Amino acid sequence: MIEIHKLVKHYRKTKALKGVDLKVNRGELFAYLGPNGAGKTTTIRIMTGLTRATVGKVLLGGCDVTKEPRAAKKQFGFVPQHINLDSELTVSENLLVHGLLHQMPRRAISQRIEELLDYIDLGDKADTLIKELSGGMKRRVMIARALMHSPQMLFLDEPTVGLDPNIRRRIWALIKTIQQGGVTVFLTTHYIEEAEFLAARVAFIDLGSIVALDTPQNLMAGIGNWAIDEFQSNHMRSFYFQTQEEAKKWAATHKNGFTLRRVNLEDAFLALTGKKIK
């Protein structure tokens, strides 16, 4: 569904992407993780036609983003990191504008708006101004807007940033439901547990290159199953073990304060790059 071949992007002297190769399967929920400046947003901007690659090619549903921009853009919906709804319009008016931009018939637009507002559980907010909604509601409207023209794939760039944990989990459920309905979902996020919970596969990108690509379970298992965080003054080090018994045996020989826990996806990223996702 999504194919990226030898993608390179230079901004003057900065090499934002250094030959990224990637394939995302039809109906897959794929997460793209990395620290600030790793190349996540540059990749998604190229895929959505907002930025041109220096070298390389992106195919969406077989359409070349550079050579067939209109055909490619019909394939996807895009939810950017920053809320860009028209705050002076109502919820339904925002969706209407998007439908008209995609040249949908008026009757189809009205029916689709009703379907989507029920889908995101905001049927009673159709005539409410965007500026009167909570942050979580605005995020749901942005997802509904991206789905107006029934795209085959959905790009989500930090879709839950700034939301409290309860609202984040509600958005997670919505994203999972969308994917289970057959839509291919490409997700970038700073919330490591978000990718661990949602994604079938994860790619780690750092300094413009993909350093690992696998299922969350395989990436975590690659470093161990149990972790010990050891605290020394203002410093913390993590050690990884295959079994809880091995971890406890190690802990018995050390006097510094520590915590024992399960390995998570951020541990795998840190072990591969030496950096935290933030």
Image (cartoon, grey):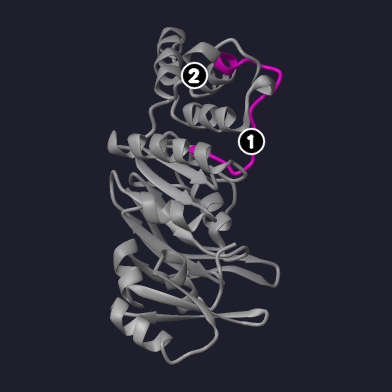
Q: Position of residue 120 (x, y in %)?
A: 44, 25
Q: Is residue 143 above or below residue 39?
A: above
**Neighbours of disc 2 within 10 Å: few (<14), some (14-19), many (20+):** some
Q: Position of residue 276 (x, y in %)?
A: 56, 69
**Pick the front one: 250 or 94:** 250
State the predominant SS element of the stretch in magenta: loop
Kindly identify which numbered label has been placed on residue 83. Answer: 1
Magenta-drawn segment = 78-93
Q: Mark 2 or mark 1: which is in front?
A: 2
**Pick the front one: 143 or 278:** 278
Q: Is residue 170 above or below residue 2?
A: above
Local secondary structure at mark 2:
loop
In the rendered structure, are the residues bearing label 2 and label 1 in contact, judged by CB atoms less than 8 Å apart?
no
Q: Position of residue 6 (x, y in %)?
A: 44, 67
Residue at 38% across, 60% down = 202
**Pick the front one: 263 or 103:** 263
Say which label, 2 or 1, has the lower sequence index. 1
Q: Is residue 42 left or right of residue 76?
A: right
